[in-house]
């Protein structure tokens, strides 16, 4: 029984499925108003853009072009929809966190300035900022504006988050807020929040 329990636990962790069992909410559609109200209620106002991922492309986070976690990519398991990515002004990925790496406060890449790196994590440093924009529900004008602003900043931080994950997204967002304030980084960083709840247009 212990062996079965251990295998079950490993499967849950490797697929990020265990977040559903740890105080999460149901995965349901969220409107723009619901997302805005959630951010306001949690005093999250430091972002430059508050966007949605395209519903039909959410699985693309697990594709070779977008996957952060190389171990999961190689083993064909689903990537987490809770992520924090840091890109430099050239759009090169310089650091990242995904929920499957473990507790954010334990692996807090925002605990140092400009960021803390854990070299043993299987992060895909081949990712590029420009590719993210293909997944977002934006028009061409927004796309060009975001690309231009990203080139003007030292770093661009992209946060994939959702309301259904409850504690997990909330901790990541609040740690980002603390980071920007503690190290006075706001002027150096473009912050893009991308909601991965299944969105509605209303």
Image: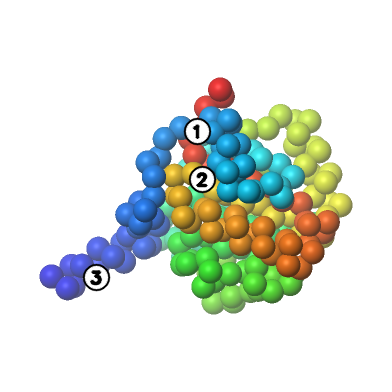
Question: Residue 192 location in percent, x, y?
Answer: 69, 47
Question: Residue 186 location in percent, x, y?
Answer: 78, 57
Question: Residue 4 location in percent, x, y?
Answer: 18, 67
Identify the residue at horizontal 36%, vertical 63% (top origin): 13
Q: Is residue 196 left or right of residue 112?
A: left
Instruction: Give the foreground label among 3 and 2.
Output: 2
> Toward the viewer: 193 or 182?
182
What colouring does the structure picture have? rainbow
Distance Cα–Cα, label 3 vs label 2: 28 Å
Tag 1 near tag 2, CB within 8 Å: yes
Identify the residue at horizontal 53%, vertical 53% (top origin): 170
Identify the residue at horizontal 40%, vertical 40% (top origin): 27
Identify the residue at horizontal 46%, vertical 55% (top origin): 167
> Toward the viewer: 24 or 195?
24
Marked residue nearer the N-terminal end (1 or 2): 1
Residue picked out by circle 2: 162
Residue picked out by circle 3: 6
> Toward the viewer: 29 or 179?
179
Q: Is residue 94 visible?
A: no
Dot 2, crowdedness within 10 Å: few (<14), some or many (≥20)? many
Total marks drawn? Answer: 3
Distance Cα–Cα, label 3 vs label 1: 35 Å
Marked residue nearer the N-terminal end (3 or 1): 3
Question: Residue 129 location in percent, x, y?
Answer: 70, 51
Residue 19: name its quadrant: bottom left
Residue picked out by circle 1: 30
Dot 1, crowdedness within 10 Å: few (<14), some or many (≥20)? many
* Quarter of the picture holding the N terminus: bottom left
């Amino acid at each position: 029984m212990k062996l079965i329990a251990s295998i079950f636990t490993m499967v849950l962790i490797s697929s990020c499925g265990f977040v559903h069992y740890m105080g999460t909410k149901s995965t349901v559609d969220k409107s723009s108003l619901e997302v805005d109200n959630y951010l306001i209620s949690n005093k999250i106002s430091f972002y430059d853009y508050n966007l949605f991922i395209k519903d039909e492309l959410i699985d693309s986070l697990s594709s070779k072009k977008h996957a952060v976690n190389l171990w999961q990519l190689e083993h064909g398991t689903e990537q987490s929809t809770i992520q924090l990515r840091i890109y430099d002004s050239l759009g090169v990925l310089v650091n990242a966190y995904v929920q499957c790496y473990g507790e954010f406060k334990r692996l807090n890449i925002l605990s140092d300035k400009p960021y803390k790196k854990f070299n043993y994590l299987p992060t895909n440093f081949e990712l590029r900022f420009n590719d993210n924009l293909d997944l977002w529900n934006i028009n061409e004008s927004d796309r060009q504006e975001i690309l231009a602003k990203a080139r003007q900043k030292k770093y661009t931080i992209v946060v994939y988050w959702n309301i259904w994950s409850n504690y997990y997204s909330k901790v990541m967002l609040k740690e980002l807020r603390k980071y920007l304030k503690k190290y006075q980084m706001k002027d150096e960083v473009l912050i893009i929040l991308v909601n991965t709840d299944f969105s509605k247009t209303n």
